[in-house]
Image (tube, rainbow, N blue to C red):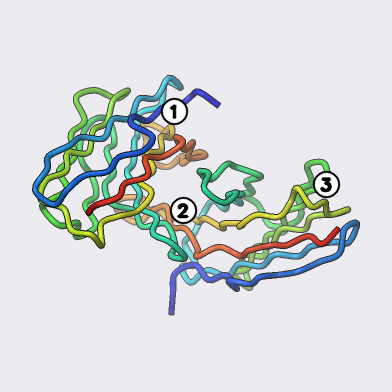
Amino acid sequence: ETGVTQTPRHLVMGMTNKKSLKCEQHLGHNAMYWYKQSAKKPLELMFVYNFKEQTENNSVPSRFSPECPNSSHLFLHLHTLQPEDSALYLCASSLIGLAGGTQETQYFGPGTRLLVL
Amino acid sequence: QKEVEQNSGPLSVPEGAIASLNCTYSDRGSQSFFWYRQYSGKSPELIMFIYSNGDKEDGRFTAQLNKASQYVSLLIRDSQPSDSATYLCAVTVTSGTYKYIFGTGTRLKVLA
């Protein structure tokens, strides 16, 4: 499945580093999402962008900063992370009807496995 | 009460048996229901979605929805070892802004 791509696939960073995760969708979708998945924990929704506007921020620490320049690209900027931020970061996209009432399947990218030392 | 609840498992079934995965949700305004499969170390992928009460069949998979009981299930017939994965239930709700909520997932082990 190449509809949603994520880079890098693996990332190791120190607590003082700054890095960015990139997500790109080729499905013509208008909504994009960042999820965090820690070991043995459920998917945690972090951010939602609908038509490039951020519509949801689930109390995510400011050391995570999203950016959505257009409906096909989504970034997650990381700085001064903590070891507990080590996880699989998943990007997803979906198509939301203009009336806001149609939610279709979310398609996930392969994820970025992040290790913070 | 969690918004979407699943038994974390593991649910172990012998090869060829029917695996039954269950999910309950708390919001009666929930509209769409999805089952995803996630292999270890991989990202979730859609198995089925269902919007209306009743059964929906796709190959070896059947999704069952009962909105009155706020219950959705996934049946896997003729289970194969390759079905061993974590199965995530997801529910969407539109109230103001929409929400897409995942359950914690049920780990299924199909024993050869």
Are dots 2 and 3 on a single chain? yes
Label 2 crowd (10 A; few <14 / some 14-19 / many >=20): many
Amino acid, disc 2: Thr
The residue that disc 1 covers is A4
When the figure is inspected, residue A17 is found, relative to residue A2, above or below; the finding is: below
When the figure is inspected, residue B105 is found, relative to residue A21, above or below; the finding is: below
The residue that disc 3 covers is B60
Disc with the residue nearer the chain's start (2 vs 3)? 3
Give the alpha-carbon distance from disc 2 to disc 3, as whole Å.
Answer: 25 Å
Secondary structure of residue under mark 3: loop
Q: Quadrant of residue B84?
A: bottom right
The residue that disc 2 covers is B92
Label 1 crowd (10 A; few <14 / some 14-19 / many >=20): many
Give the alpha-carbon distance from disc 1 to disc 3, as whole Å.
Answer: 27 Å
Q: Position of residue A29 (x, y in %)?
A: 40, 26
Question: From the viewer's perspective, is the residue at label 1 or at label 3 nearer?
Answer: 1
Secondary structure of residue under mark 1: strand
Q: Position of residue B53 (x, y in %)?
A: 68, 57
Which residue is depicted at the point 33% across and 31% down? A8
Amino acid, disc 3: Arg
Give the alpha-carbon distance from disc 2 to disc 1, as whole Å.
Answer: 21 Å
When the figure is inspected, residue B8 is found, relative to residue B94, above or below; the finding is: below
Which residue is depicted at the point 43% across and 19% down? A26
Q: Position of residue B79 (x, y in %)?
A: 83, 54
Question: From the viewer's perspective, is the residue at label 2 or at label 3 nearer?
Answer: 3
Please give the chain letter of the residue carrying mark 3. Answer: B
Name the side, left or right, on which B13 lies relative to B35: right
**Of all residues shown, which one is farthest toward the bottom?**
B1
Name the side, left or right, on which B108 lies relative to A97: right
Q: Position of residue B111 (x, y in %)?
A: 82, 62
Secondary structure of residue under mark 2: strand
